Image (cartoon, grey):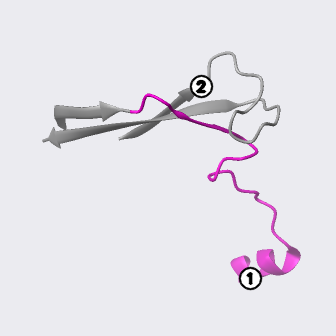
């Protein structure tokens, strides 16, 4: 299971080194689930990954060119 929380009192991203408004800590928890209930927890990530809006792999720009917009709309 992977979850993320806001980083506490961080002004700059430790991953890319830029000043950012929104920095998150991504944690990972390995567990064995049975019928949606955790039976055994194998380990937590002790050194969470930090990401900001500049270096996140999930951050996408929504800019499309005129040709791309026409292609999507048909």
**Residue 7: mark:** none
Q: Is residue 68 above or below residue 37?
A: below
Q: Residue at x 71, y 84 (%)?
A: 74
Q: Residue furthest front?
A: 47
Q: Are marks 1 and 2 in contact (CB under 8 Å)?
A: no
Image coordinates for residue 72, horizontal then vertical, percent? 70, 77
User: Image quadrant for the N terminus?
Assistant: top left
| Numbered range of the magenta stretch | 45-74
Residue 30 shown left or right of residue 59 in the figure? left
Give 34 or 43, whichever is nearer the viewer: 43
Tell me what residue is drawn at x 61 percent, y 32 percent. 24
Where does label 2 land, which residue?
A: 6
* Residue ranking furthest to the right: 66
Q: Is 27 rendered above or below residue 58?
A: above
| Direction from residue 31 to residue 74 in the image, left or right | right
Q: Determine the residue positioned at 73% across, 33% down.
A: 13
How many neighbours does mark 1 have within 10 angstroms: few (below 14), some (14-19), or many (20 or more)? few
Is 67 rendered above or below residue 36?
below
Q: Quadrant of residue 68?
A: bottom right
Q: Is residue 70 magenta?
A: yes
Compare residues 28 and 47 and report the one nearer the observer. 47
Residue 59 appears at what percent x and percent y? Answer: 68, 51
* Rendered image: mark on residue 71: 1
Q: In the structure shown, which secondary structural element does the residue marked by tag 1 occupy?
A: helix
């Amino acid at each position: 299971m992977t979850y993320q929380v806001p980083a506490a009192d961080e002004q700059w991203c430790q991953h890319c080194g830029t000043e950012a408004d929104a920095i998150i800590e991504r944690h990972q928890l390995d567990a064995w689930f049975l019928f949606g209930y955790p039976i055994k927890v194998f380990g937590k990530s002790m050194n969470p990954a930090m990401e900001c809006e500049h270096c996140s792999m999930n951050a996408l720009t929504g800019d499309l060119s005129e040709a791309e917009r026409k292609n999507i709309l048909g």
